[in-house]
Image (tube, rainbow, N blue to C red):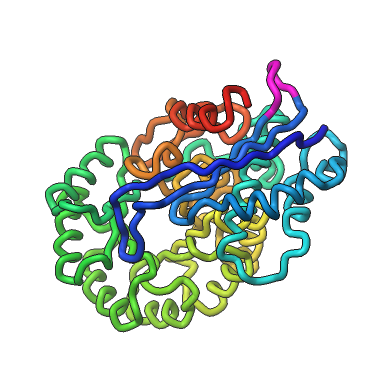
């Protein structure tokens, strides 16, 4: 048993949308295929992976450093003790050889892309959906049959007014979502409050609406928004300031009693642990959004969960950024609090299997081996286009 090849392709997810910090006019994604010599149902097992939106494609890092480290390794060194499957942890160790500690901004994404593909292959080799494989390995077989999901949108868009924003939110409700999220910070406070109130007219209550500033605010602005937002009773107030400014986050907690969320731009166990140590996050109400793909993959994400438990946090406080099937499988298999979803943007990477509609903001997972990409027709068609049918 061995990995035969790893290929990378760059795909575009460009659009005219923007948040408070970046536009997505040139946004790209790395897609990888990890091909093995294992045959299932007459075809070689191929694991697929890609990075979450918001970080650009990592082709150079993948081709120059990380893919060669795997392909040049002794194949036996990448297998589990029984030699009957790949070992994600041992592959991760090879990926990270000769890498200094710290500096997690880009390489963490490249490693996470390969890690996703490896887990897809591992589950396919074992003949199990990934969520059940994870539950069997790490949760004594307990699996969440359905996972809470919310619809992330509400981006700023040329010519998009409050009426169009309301129509967007109505479309999410029609798709089965009970909770939605919108962007703030790309307009002034008065304009954003008008947008929030327009959305509340559609969704009905603050508990059904989260807002996301994408790290735009300084402390003064973050507090001004906090005071204005608190009467709405929102689901959460997300990433008000720079994700590494733990002092800002801690001070903001003194001024905002409602739930807050952050973490999607923390890419290592150490950074996530520092958030818990110094960021003033409250384990009874706040939400942690670390993204398994952007943060070195599931191998590192499990270290994050260990750090959370050591600080008295439940995995149920984790609702990962990303909005894709990998994070959904992790949520179901490891007992997280939910998963983000992008019904209308970042397609075909966002969203879930064709056969599992969202109902009451809950979604089931397909019972197919691996992450379940084969049950999402538009995404799997892209894989075939990028790598060839059957790869």
Residue at position x 66%, y 31% in the image? 46
**Residue 150 place in picture, x, y as percent:** 37, 47
Residue 154 vs 306, above or below: the answer is: above
Residue 276 in sight = yes
Residue 256 versus residue 372: which sits nearer the camera? 372
How many numbered tags mark residues here?
Answer: 0
Q: Quadrant of residue 310?
A: bottom right
* Residue furthest top as drawn: 42
Residue at position x 48%, y 54% in the image? 56
Residue 165 versus residue 359: which sits nearer the camera? 165
Magenta-span inclusion, residue 380? no
Q: Please give left or right for residue 36 compared with residue 180 in the image.
A: right
Magenta-colored span: 39-45
Residue at position x 33%, y 80% in the image? 255
Q: Is the magenta stretch mostly helix, strand or loop?
A: strand
Q: In which quarter of the image is residue 107?
A: bottom right
Q: In which quarter of the image is residue 341?
A: top left
Residue 60 versus residue 48: which sits nearer the camera? 60
Residue at position x 57%, y 61% in the image? 106
Quarter in which the C terminus is drawn:
top right
Q: Please give left or right for residue 142 compared with residue 42 in the image.
A: left
Q: Please give left or right for residue 97 compared with residue 188 in the image.
A: right
Quarter in which the N terminus is drawn:
top right
**Residue 320 place in picture, x, y as percent:** 49, 54
**Residue 89 place in picture, x, y as percent:** 75, 51
**Residue 162 place in picture, x, y as percent:** 14, 53
Residue 123 versus residue 227: which sits nearer the camera? 123
Residue 132 in sight = no
């Amino acid at each position: 048993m061995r990995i035969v090849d790893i290929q990378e392709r760059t795909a575009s997810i460009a659009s005219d949308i923007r948040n408070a910090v970046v536009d997505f006019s040139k946004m790209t994604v790395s897609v990888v295929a990890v091909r093995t010599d294992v045959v299932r149902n007459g075809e070689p097992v191929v694991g697929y992976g890609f990075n979450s939106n918001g970080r650009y494609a990592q082709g150079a890092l993948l081709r120059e450093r990380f893919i060669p480290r795997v392909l040049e390794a002794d194949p036996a060194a990448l297998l589990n003790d029984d030699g009957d499957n790949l070992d994600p942890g041992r592959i991760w160790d090879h990926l990270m050889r000769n890498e200094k500690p710290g500096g997690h901004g880009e390489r963490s994404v490249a490693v996470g892309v390969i890690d996703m593909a490896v887990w897809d292959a591992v589950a396919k080799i074992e003949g199990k959906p990934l969520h059940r494989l994870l539950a069997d390995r790490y949760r004594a077989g307990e699996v969440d049959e359905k996972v809470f999901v919310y619809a992330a949108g509400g981006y700023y868009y040329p010519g998009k007014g409050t009426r169009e924003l309301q129509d967007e939110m109505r479309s999410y409700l029609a798709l089965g979502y009970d909770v939605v999220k919108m962007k703030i910070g790309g307009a002034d406070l008065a304009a954003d409050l008008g947008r929030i109130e327009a959305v509340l007219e559609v969704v009905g209550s603050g508990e059904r609406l989260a807002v996301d500033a994408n790290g735009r605010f300084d402390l003064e602005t973050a507090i001004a928004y906090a005071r204005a937002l608190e009467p709405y009773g929102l689901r959460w107030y997300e990433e008000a300031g720079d994700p590494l400014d733990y002092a800002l986050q801690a001070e903001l907690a003194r001024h905002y009693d409602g739930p807050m969320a952050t973490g999607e731009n923390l890419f290592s166990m150490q950074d996530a642990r520092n958030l818990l140590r110094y960021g003033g996050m409250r384990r009874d109400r706040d939400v942690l959004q670390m993204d398994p793909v952007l943060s070195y993959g599931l191998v590192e994400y499990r270290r994050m969960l260990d750090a959370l438990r050591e600080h008295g946090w439940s995995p149920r406080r984790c609702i990962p950024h990303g909005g894709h099937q990998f994070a959904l499988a992790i949520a179901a298999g490891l007992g997280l609090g939910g998963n983000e979803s992008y019904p209308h943007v970042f397609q075909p990477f966002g969203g879930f299997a064709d056969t599992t509609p969202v109902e009451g903001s809950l979604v089931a997972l397909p019972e197919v081996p691996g992450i379940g990409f084969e049950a999402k027709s538009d995404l799997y068609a892209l894989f075939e286009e990028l790598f060839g049918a059957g790869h």
